[in-house]
Image: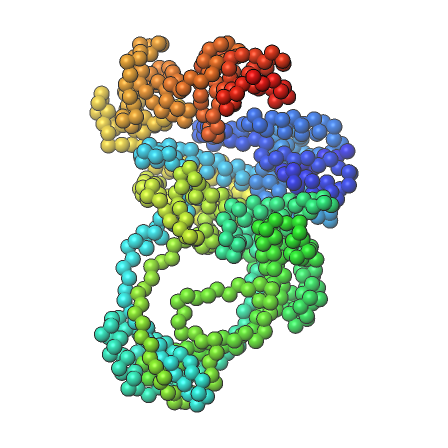
Amino acid sequence: MDLIIVESPHKAKTIEKFLKGKYKVDASKGHVRDLPVNYLGVNLNNNFEPYYVITPEKKKDIKRLSEEAAKADKIYLATDPDREGEAISWHLKEVLGLSEEQVNRIEFNEISEKAVSEALAHPRKIDQNLVDAQQARRVLDRIVGYTVSPVASSRLNESLSAGRVQSVALKMVVDREREIQAFKPQEYWNLKAELKGENKNSFKALLSEKNGKKYKPGNAEEAEKVENELKNSQFKVKTVKKTVVKSHAPAPFITSTMQQDGSIKLGVTAPQIMAIAQRLYEGVETPQGNVALITYMRTDSVRISSEAQSAARKFIADNYGKEYLPEKPNFYKTKSDAQDAHEAIRPIDVNKTPDSVKNILDKNQYKLYKLIYERFIASQMNEAIYNSVAIDVAAGEYVLKTSGKTLTFKGYTAVYDDTKKDEDDESGNSLIPPLTEGELLDLIKLIKEQKFTKPPTRYTEASLIKNMEDKGIGRPSTYATIMAKLSDKKREYVKKEKKYLVPNPISYELIDFLVKYFPDIMDISFTAKMEDELDDVGSNGKDWHQLISDFYTPFEKELNASKMTDKLCDKCGAPMMIKSGKYGSYYACSNYPECKNIKPVNEKVVIPTDRICPNCGSVMVEREGKFGKFLACSNFPKCKTTVSLTESVGVCPECGKPTKKMVSRGGKVFYGCSDYPNCKFMSWDIPTGKKCPKCGAYLISVNDKVKCSNKKCDYKE
């Protein structure tokens, strides 16, 4: 039997449903190997080669897949149809020992029987250009993040992270906030006249010109003067412009527009939207098995297949009438810098209407599917048509304006309403009575209102994503991750006030530091250009090693400059540099190796004790790290002796020594033997030091009750 490997178990279930036992389908559960978490993992001295590791939790998956691959007649790699999916297939090929020459990569834009069958009939080799494009992006982001973050953290005395695109996005938020803070409101006055003509129906017109130039009174005295002049003026219709306005249907969703619209209309974050869309793509569980509802959700292309277009046109004609169907199908132009690797986001089957699947979806899945579905159907419908009228009213040296728009044919708005209300438009009237040029008007009343100019609006997630997309920063698959990092609870660079993003104080300091020392990576045009060059690796096979090298040469100079401080070495007088080590940041003499002097960065957190280092005799100092307080030799880094000061709780059942209460990297409490590494015992519960008389496992104390640690054993005391 042939084996198909995908990333997600949900995706595997959906595919298995219609392959009907002809293939074995299994999931890698994402990446099978990646760059290490705790160190750079990029060889800066060997052509920037990445060092990939297999995490312990992935070893079981690889073992299972290896066993299945050994029994399979043929293996197909069916990971997602993008650069990351291509890279996952390549990693699978490497860890499973598959041949470079195997034609075993398949891809499909939707999880349907037809699409998967078509993919199986046309396998190809792994596209190394796409793999290299992903490697280049990963390596570049790793270099920036893992070298800049420690320096920024040391300089600002905070645990901070910097990222190639993330920091530019944060700068946009900070810059906007500074614009708002520096903004000085300017006073102006609106004068609105309520008028009526021969028709006797009244309407309102807003003062907008004086002597042929745009005009608003700037203060109360000026407004009162204009008011008096208008009261003594004759009002006459100057011009009447009637036009038919057509509004074209919007294109089907791409990743960024789905995130923007979803954020505005559904009130959820970009990461949440992507998680919901992922399930709709991979398949939702039903009593009849998993069902996939939408095409792939990471795309920057507005293209759709002719088959999908034909199905949409038939659906529109059958359900809305032929007057809603354009004579020729609607086509949309994809942006020039887009990858255009696959279709726009759309429903797989237009006959699966939102109402027909409502009972198998949760609330948010239904809302997003409805949004995607309606946007797609609307994209293939006729234009909405409005009768528009614009009136200019003359009053002495002043001109007042009004306008109105009436919908005469719904067109695509019968399905999807994308109209945006302009809060600043104070001149419009929904209905304007019939008027003719030269017609005299009667003044009913004048309305005078003090106003102030408004500062720029803060970014929302939706508007920030749109701005990033417009400026060419980031790519569809990165927007949700960036939004998540900006709002990360650990660092929280921005907070949300209602729907708006507001930077926290540390964000200003971080951005000022980055702009000062890393002007290139904080420059929007530089970041956009780098995105294009990274794309060039995937589309044209550009050498990614050379791309990284060209970036790193000037970046390294900026990095070294950022590490240099005003602090002078007390031994040789040379400037001290900030460096990072296992136990945090420290000052090191820039005259190294001639001078090897080092000093702690934060003197206040180093507390001398009366304890002596058992290895070199130096004074031990008290420090605090991720796992609590500990003693460290003051002769670090020559002597790296440490002694834990964490609380002793419990007794090790293996060697009888005390166990210590500790905290894992994930924040979970555990109890480890104080004689580590000689004894590697650990437990998630407090060990009593005794063994169970029933099964021999060690006993634990939970809520002051003693029981067996073996979940299958019911022994209690």
Lateral position of residue 635 relative to residue 255, left or right: left
Q: For the C terminus, give its image quadrant.
A: top right
Q: Nearer the viewer, residue 179 or 264?
A: 264
User: Residue visible at 33% across and 88% down?
Assistant: 234
Residue 308 visible to an observer of this rendering: no
Q: Nearer the viewer, residue 346 or 95?
A: 346
Which of the 4 image quadrants contains residue 538? top right
User: Residue visible at 70% across and 29% down?
Assistant: 69
Lateral position of residue 143 relative to residue 633, left or right: right
Lateral position of residue 364 relative to residue 64, left or right: left
Q: Nearer the viewer, residue 143 or 613?
A: 613
Could you say where residue 623 lies in the image, as x and y percent from the top left? 34, 22
Instruction: Judge whether 230 appears above or below 666 on screen.
Output: below
Which of the 4 image quadrants contains residue 549? top left
User: Residue visible at 55% across and 27% down?
Assistant: 55
Instruction: Judge whether 595 appears above or below 35 on screen.
Output: above
Could you say where residue 128 lies in the image, as x and y percent from the top left? 59, 38
User: Residue visible at 43% across and 43% down?
Assistant: 487
Could you say where residue 101 lies in the image, as x and y percent from the top left? 67, 34
